Amino acid sequence: MLFTCYIRPILEYACIVWSPQTAKNSFLIEYIQRKFVKAIFARCGVPFSSYDCSLSCINESTLSKRCVVASLIMTYNIFNSKVNIPPETMFASSPTSSRTRSRVLSQLFDLSLLAL
């Protein structure tokens, strides 16, 4: 309960926009949650076996998984006009030749805009 009320909102605040781009930054943010979960188990006298097992015991998921879910929900809302953001802004356009296969790749959904 304390985690959900106090820690989780701070860690997840605007993760759609600022999601860490490097593994190091992702680890540093996840470390806060890992440390808190370990402290909860220590305070309750429950042995801490592994981070993933501990998260499943308290019905939580990793911060990175929750950020991916939040990004997917936002994408769904954008493409279904539930928010006032034009879906065209989600596509990247680059000047490529129409004679190469890279043209197809440039027309695909630009995942970097999702901040996954």
Image (cartoon, helix red, strand yellow):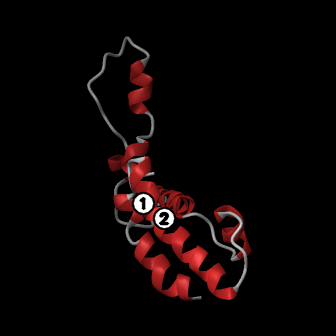
Q: Nearer the viewer, residue 108 or 114?
A: 114
Secondary structure state at the residue bearing disc 1: helix
Residue 49: x and y in percent read 71, 66
Q: In percent of the image, x 39 and y 47: which residue is there?
A: 22
Q: In percent of the image, x 59 and y 88: which residue is there?
A: 1
Q: Nearer the viewer, residue 81 or 29?
A: 29
Look at the numbered discs 2 and 1 and tell me whether their residues touch, using CB distance below 8 Å: yes
Alpha-carbon neighbours of circle 2 within 10 Å: few (<14), some, or many (≥20)?
few
Q: In percent of the image, x 33 and y 38: which residue is there?
A: 92
**Residue situated furthest left in the rendering:** 95
Residue 98: x and y in percent read 35, 16
Q: Which residue is mark 2?
A: 31
Q: Nearer the viewer, residue 9 or 89?
A: 9
Mark pair 2, 1: CA separation: 5 Å
Q: Is residue 43 above or below residue 79?
A: below
Q: Which residue is mark 1?
A: 28
Secondary structure state at the residue bearing disc 2: helix
Res. 93 mark? none
Residue 48: x and y in percent read 69, 71
Q: Is residue 15 above or below residue 101?
A: below
Q: Is residue 59 at all visible to an observer of this figure?
A: yes
**Residue situated furthest top in the rendering:** 99
Q: Is residue 41 above or below residue 112?
A: below
* Amino acid type of the residue that numbered disc 1 sits on in the rendered structure: Leu
* Amino acid type of the residue that numbered disc 2 sits on in the rendered structure: Tyr
Q: In the figure, residue 42 lies in which quadrant?
A: bottom right
Residue 20: x and y in percent read 39, 54
Q: Is residue 114 at all visible to an observer of this figure?
A: no
Q: Nearer the viewer, residue 72 or 1?
A: 1
